[in-house]
Each structure stands twice: as structure tokens, then as C-alpha cells.
Image (cartoon, rainbow, N blue to C red):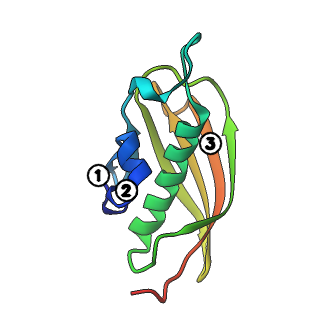
Amino acid sequence: MSDILSKLPYARFLGLMSVIDDDRLIVTMPFDGKLIGDPILPALHGGSTAALLEFTAIAEIARVHPGARLPRPINVSIAYLRSGKPLEVRASARIVKAGRRVAHVHAMAWQAEPDQPIATLTAHFLMDHDAA
């Protein structure tokens, strides 16, 4: 697990794990029955998917800017593109632009194929580079 993810209680609750693959951070949320939001379909709860995307974006910022404090979200927009099946979910993030105080990040979550995302995130995060 990314060092930053291990410090976040909800990330630990979700069981998030991270790996670096070709210099790209991939965060995995293993399937667990507690993540089901609609038992009739069944489908993953949108909140768990959103949390995965937000934590992936935070972990990517922390990886690229290791001296900064925990990035804090300014605004977050989630697009739910299809229902999440009761399977593990993977996510990756890309920093579009990072200044001294704000980072603009895109993240994507998928299950079977990365080119078929189940949700995307667009967000701005406040960074504090002056922190120790």
C-alpha cells in the first residue's frame, strides 16, 4: 500500500492497495460484500468508487510531490459511466497541472479493461509544499 494510503483510515477500511507499473500508480480496491450499494443488481456503492478515485488522486500527488502535506480537495467531480460489478476495481490518476498551491488531477476507475472506465474524477487539490 502506498505510504499515504496506509495513513488514511477509510482507505484501510476499503482495503486499498497500490503498485507502480511502468512509472504509473495503480490503486486496487478488492471486492468485499460491504461495498455493495444495490444488492438487487448487485452494484458497487458509488461512494466507495468515489473514495477510490479521490484516494488515487491524493496518492498520485503525494508520489509526485513527496515533500507536500496531505493534499486537501477543493472541488471534486465524479462521472459515473456504468455500474460497478461485484469485482475488484482499479484506478489510476494523472496530474494535469500542478502549481505551488493547487493541483488539477484526472483519475479513472475500471474493472475488466482500462479503456472501459466505470467512473472518472476531475478535481483540484490544495497543496502545502512548505510543510515538513
- In three-dimensional space, the C-alpha distance between marks 3 and 2, rounded to whole angstroms, equals 19 Å
Q: Is residue 5 shown above or below 112? A: below
- Out of 106 and 123, give the one closest to the viewer: 123
The kind of secondary structure element at disc 1 is loop
> Which callout, 3 or 2, points at the residue further toward the start of the chain?
2
Of mark 1 and mark 3, the one earlier in the sequence is 1
Q: Nearer the viewer, mark 1 or mark 3?
A: 1
The residue positioned 57% from the left and 68% from the top of the image is: 72
Spatial CA distance of label 1 from label 3 is 22 Å
Instruction: Please name the residue that numbered disc 3 is placed on.
Output: 120
Three-letter code, disc 3: Thr
**Residue 108 sits in quarter:** top right
Q: Residues within 10 Å of mark 1 (few under 14, many from 20)?
A: some
**Pointer 2 residue:** 5
User: At numbered mark 3, what does the secondary structure look like: helix, strand or loop?
Assistant: strand
Q: Is residue 52 above or below residue 33?
A: below
Secondary structure at badge 2 equals helix
Measured from the top left, where is residue 14 in percent x and y? Answer: 40, 41
| Residue 34 percent coordinates (x, y) | 44, 28
Please tell me which residue is depicted at 35% across the width and 56% down the height of the picture.
Answer: 23
Q: What is the tally of numbered marks visible in this picture? A: 3
Q: Residues within 10 Å of mark 3 (few under 14, many from 20)?
A: many
Q: Are marks 1 and 2 in contact (CB under 8 Å)?
A: yes
**Residue type, label 2:** Leu
